Image: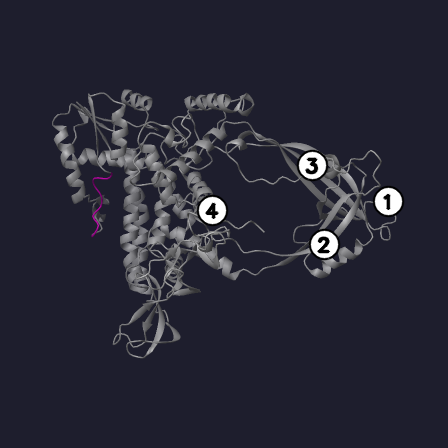
Amino acid sequence: MNLIIVESPTKARTIQKFLNKDFSVVSSYGHVRDLPKKELGIDIENNFQPKYVVPLIARKRLTPIKKSLLKTTKIILATDEDREGEAISWHLSEVLKLNPENTERIVFHEITKSAIEEALKNPRQIDMDLVGAQQARRILDRLVGYKLSPFLWRKIAKGLSAGRVQSVALRLIAEREREIQNFKPQEYWSIEALLKKLTLSPSPTFKINSVEGQNSQKEFTATLIKKDNEAIGKFDIKTKENADKILKDLEGAKYQIADIEKRELRRNPLPAFTTSTLQQEAWQKLHFSSKLTMSLAQTLYENGLITYHRTDSLNLSNQSLFAAKKFIIENYGQNYWSGFLRKFKTKSKGAQEAHEAIRPTDPNVTAPSTIKIKLDYSKHSEENLSKLYELIWKRFIASQMAQAVFDSTLINIAAKNPALHQSEASGAGYTFRATGQVLKFDGFLKVYPIKFKETELPPLEENEILDLIKLVSLQHFTEPPARYSEATLIKVLEENGIGRPSTYAPIISTIQDRNYVQKDEKRKFFPTDIGFSVNDMLVEHFPEIVDLKFTATIEESLDQIAQGQKKWQPVIKEFYEPFSRHLAQKYEEVEKQKPEPEPTDKICPKCGKPLLIRTSRFGRFYACSDFPKCRHTESIVNSIGMTCPECGQGQIHEKRTRRGKIFYACSRWPDCKFALWDKPTGKLCPKCNSLLVSNIKNKIKCSNKECDYKEAKK
């Protein structure tokens, strides 16, 4: 009997279907060893030797595996193909005391019959370089967390913690928030002309109701771009006085087409997903958090529907490309295929080029519901699994489809005031520009729509005189940089080499769980008071820990360990020794922060003394000023000024989940359980009389899921 060991029971069931009775597939349920929870677990004096323990739950799950070993002639370790998976295989080998002579390691990018059979033909040994890279990351993170967190307890507040990579993410969010707070808007103006073809008396044969007649009279907008052949930049018209001067110059001006440029624009499809781009797009299109996205992808992978979902490679196998070609031609037509096997090159440093991008294992499976296997919906709904699979499927198929083609028109319009510009031949005067774009062939957009704007211009000719309908000046103000969303935060982490595909979701989860950041009503991150305090302390006293370049250098070192170019112990030593000396010095130098409480006009209901606003790692709260004699505390509520529609007694308060997500609930909870995710508007639905709510895109809809009422865009 051959025993195959994997991490997940779902993965075990999927693989078992592809094998005969000579194979038995069992699950370890993930890691079987780890560093201890209540101690450092690293022997610093003994070359950073880790002390691994087997948790009680893992011991119970290992018992049936140990019994299976008695009937086994060959053990095959088939954990995931990344560093984490390699480490799990190594830990299994160590805990089960497996004999290398009858133990093999196999890897595969997808859980399909052909992939499993091919992997079984090409076994290898455990890659200790990959194991070393995983150990190095785990030990580095443990050293930073266990050594730096007590420093924060002593200098700021009890219960705080610091992480090597999470602290960098916190710094990005905190610095962006301060940019927003310190932002000073700058005024600027633009000039627009609303024009149309010169109105002429219609000839007897002119069809006033024809499409051509309507199109030829279409109004269009042109924007001022030049004065006396000198370009006018976006911010060059700084005041209303500047704008009014231009409007005065243009009084009585003649508008004539100077030149027309027509060309064909082609737009290429995007590549199939990597872990990073999947998380970004799932947030943008589906509003899935990175944690949910990765959990859904794990389920799809373990059920054999998609390839491995932790990857930074854009590679695609030739087999998958030919399958995509066949599907596109048969379902959309020859002209929708790109005409060649389109391949993409990975730009990110340290990408594992041996891996593949995320794609469906079979292009003919357009949705999970179309396959015969029964998926396990205990963790996730069929709807969410289908949404993510469809996103992955569409992106992969679109990557092999033809370009989208647009007809583009650019028109420059000369505007001259005869009173100011006597010479028609002179280049003096103003120039306006109108642009048009019309989709000619949808190509990949047929499968994977992306936002684009179509603007159709009327048929025009060079030197044609135009009618001015109106000339307007528009006031604008520069806007502050936007807060980070999950998508934009992951993007900047990847661009700076911070973390790797498997770490983005844990990074984002950790800084929310620690209450260092929360999300606003648009689901974008902002730091809490305690988040600011922790970040400021680290930036001032441990700049190397939160330095983007330093953290990226550590990631490069981990990659070099994985490639066998470095050993993990020297990398740890090079980091730890100066860090340890620096930490000891800061314990002596840095004084404990004493945040001043904010006075309020509220009175303590227990003793009658004034209440103060204090801050803990859980956020701001009211506390009695007579502490410790009086220990009364209460949460700070944010009422939106609306009576609960369900009980008619309580007030609707804005609240936050443990992870910082905003929701709206009755103040009489738990007696009244009324709650909504979207913000109530105070108005009632005209169809069913339920509350209308505003979602994160500021769209008004009914809160009743059974009602389809939505307000039309204004």
Q: Which residue appears farthest toward the right when viewing the image? A: 422
Q: Where is residue 188, by image quadrant?
A: bottom right
Q: Is residue 441 above or below residue 700?
A: above
Predominant SS along the magenta part: loop
Q: Are marks 2 and 1 in contact (CB under 8 Å)?
A: no
Task: Find the distance from the CA under tag 1 to the CA under tag 3.
Answer: 25 Å
**Mark closer to the chain start, 3 or 2:** 3
Report which residue position mark 1 lands on.
424
Q: Are marks 2 and 4 in contact (CB under 8 Å)?
A: no
**Mark closer to the chain start, 4 or 3:** 3
Q: Circle 1 sits in a helix, a strand or a loop, which is it?
A: loop
Residue type, mark 3 in image: Thr
Give the total number of marks visible in the rendering: 4
Q: Is residue 548 above or below residue 669?
A: above
Report which residue position mark 2 lands on.
472
Residue type, mark 1 in image: Glu
Task: Find the distance from the CA under tag 2 to the CA under tag 1.
Answer: 25 Å
Q: Residues within 10 Å of mark 2 (few under 14, many from 20)?
A: some
Q: Which circle marks residue 264 in the picture? A: none
Q: Which residues are magenta?
A: 30-38
Q: Position of residue 698 (x, y in %)?
A: 51, 52
Report which residue position mark 3 lands on.
409
